[in-house]
Image (cartoon, rainbow, N blue to C red):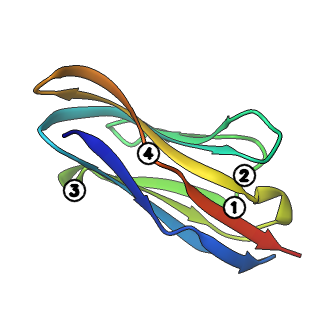
Amino acid sequence: QVQLLESGGGLVQAGGSLRLSCAASGNIFSINTMNWYRQAPGKQRELVAAITSSGVTNYADSVKGRFTISRDNAKNTVYLQMNSLKPEDTADYYCNARVLARSGRLELWGQGTPVTVSS
């Protein structure tokens, strides 16, 4: 079964840091862009950061300079280092990836990991 498994969410005080991880597993041949999205209560899901297979990154304006996305292609894993966290960063964070697997081209979503930033 091809899937994404996230970890690393939790509760942190404003100004603190967290590191999210997302590992793709299953019979995967290649992974294109890997993304982190977030969804706060009552709000639409938004793209936080993206990274291509060659390492080109893109960030939402709200997290530029504070968040860093990276990936380990050998481990099929993407990370999101979040520094200087603010209460408005509180949300469920989701990993997303488009993969080429034995079963074909798939768009995968992780189960979500909660991040709560207290003021």
- Residue nearest the observer in this picture, 59 or 94: 94
Q: Amino acid at mark 3?
A: Lys
- Where residue 74 sits: x, y (%)? 18, 53
Quadrant location of the C terminus?
Answer: bottom right
* Dot placed on the residue nearer the N-terminal end, 1 or 3: 1
Residue located beneath label 4 in the image: 110
Depth check, mark 3 against mark 2: the one in front is: 3
Q: Are marks 3 and 2 in contact (CB under 8 Å)?
A: no
User: Which residue is found at the position 19% from the left and 33% from the top?
Assistant: 30
Name the element at disc 2.
Answer: loop
Find the distance from the CA under tag 4 to the CA under tag 3. 16 Å
Residue 72 location in percent, x, y? 29, 55
In this rendering, the answer to whether 114 lies above or below 37 is: below
Q: Is residue 84 visible?
A: yes
- Which residue sits at x=10%, y=27%? 102
Disc 4 secondary structure class? loop
Mark 4 or mark 1: name the one nearer the start of the chain: 1
- Point out the frontmost of discs 4 and 3: 4
Q: Are marks 2 and 4 in contact (CB under 8 Å)?
A: no
Residue at image coords 76%, 42%: 61
Q: Is residue 25 left or right of residue 42?
A: left
Q: Mark 3 = which residue?
A: 75
Q: Which residue is mark 1?
A: 66
Q: Residues within 10 Å of mark 4 (few under 14, many from 20)?
A: some
Q: Secondary structure at mark 3?
A: helix
Residue 1 found in image quarter: top left
Q: Vertical placement of 43 versus 93: above or below?
A: above
- Dot 4 and dot 1 residues touching (CB under 8 Å): no
